Amino acid sequence: MRSDPPHDATESLRLLVRLLRRDAAGIRRCLQARPDALDELAAVAVDGGLSVVLLRALADSPLAQEISVKQQRALTRRCEHQATRYAVLEKGFAHVANVFDSADVPFMLLKGPYLAARFYGDPQGREFVDLDLLVRHADRRRAFSILEEAGYARRSRVLGNEALTAFFVHGFDFVADGVNLDLHWGLSRHPSFHLDESIVWERRGTFPLGGRSYDVLSDEHEVTLEVLALLRDIERGRPKIKSFVDLIQVVATFDATMPWDALFADSRSNGTYGPLVNVLSLSIDVADAHDLAPRLTASLAQHANRRVRSIRVALPLGPGPKRTDLSNRLWAARSHDALLGSWFVWWAVSLPFRRAVHGWPRPVASRPTATA
């Protein structure tokens, strides 16, 4: 049994995936099923942070003319806004990278310009609103100090004390002069996860960006990062179409070379087996992208008995208010490699800390950053 989101959002997701993969037959199939699919996709893209992705996918294509003038204007406004934001983020990122280099604190670049450059072809090829860096857990406190000395204020609130709060989350948010920065010391946080930090750093790769090379996650850990991020969104009742598109882009790019069987074998020991099987299966099903990642599809078929099948997960991907659905939370809970009761206890105990860090109104930096 497949788990699908609302029909219009599903069609928008599937059409966008085919546009990105330059699949002419797939595009025709989507448009034949619904002639107004492009205009609906434009509305979803504007709402879901995919305006840049959609316009670039339609560049030099006559299909762009099938989008209404109203939606074309909305897409263009979002792209212009992202261009302005990118200029600020690019300058802020160069400064932060230099600060960490000067302090001799290693970091990895996550998401943001790296994700856009590698999987969409250009650092400006996908909308993003902040920068994400990963440091070793042992460097967490030092990294806080480095950012504060560079003019960044922590937006994340703490409960009790910093160390206690940091136990329940995997990152804090910082801000300075319009640059939002998420500092991570882990890929995710749950007692069922046992990702070996030394392996994460040992297997890291590099990626060229803006005239220099940055450390980035290995391909296997990039897939794991995307999966765990999407699982958290589903758990919160706020899965985003952008997250599904990202994951499909990642697995389609990696499919020919990724040792999927080895990834699933390793995940049994680090607590990410259930999340990987369920989120990857769900994403491939929802996007109807089995042909784009045939090796992954074949590998997932060997783990079908681990899929959570009894609950139809609610995925409100399209425009409009997002809601938390109990079925989402239960689906996510059962996807973890943890007993349902222990998952609920962790969820309840960690909730105030997670809300303090990411959910409640947070202070804005009042002091300037030295980016000049």
Image: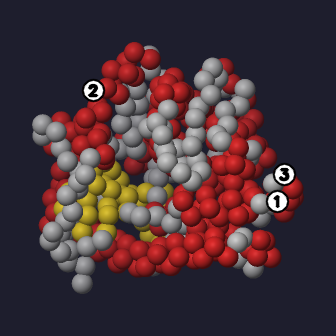
Q: Secondary structure under badge 1?
A: loop
Task: Return the x and y of residue 19 as percentages of the image width and height.
Answer: 74, 62
Q: Nearer the viewer, mark 1 or mark 2?
A: 1
Q: Nearer the viewer, residue 68 or 258?
A: 68
Q: Nearer the viewer, residue 359 or 206?
A: 359
Name the colouring of the figure.
secondary structure
Tell me, for residue 349, which label it has, or none.
2
Image quarter of residue 31: bottom right
Can you say whether 102 is above or below 5 in the image? Answer: below
C-alpha separation, residue under disc 3 versus residue under disc 2 = 46 Å
Q: Secondary structure under badge 2?
A: helix
Q: Which residue is mark 1?
A: 35
Query: Residue at coordinates 28% horizontally, 55% vertically from top-left?
Result: 173
Q: Nearer the viewer, mark 3 or mark 2?
A: 3
> Left or right: where does residue 327 sit relative to residue 85?
right
C-alpha separation, residue under disc 3 versus residue under disc 1 = 7 Å
Can you say whether 318 is above or below 66 in the image? Answer: above
Tell me, for residue 33, which label it has, or none.
3
Query: Residue at coordinates 18% horizontally, 50% vertically from top-left?
Result: 141
* Type of the residue with mark 3: Ala
Q: Nearer the viewer, residue 24 or 216?
A: 24
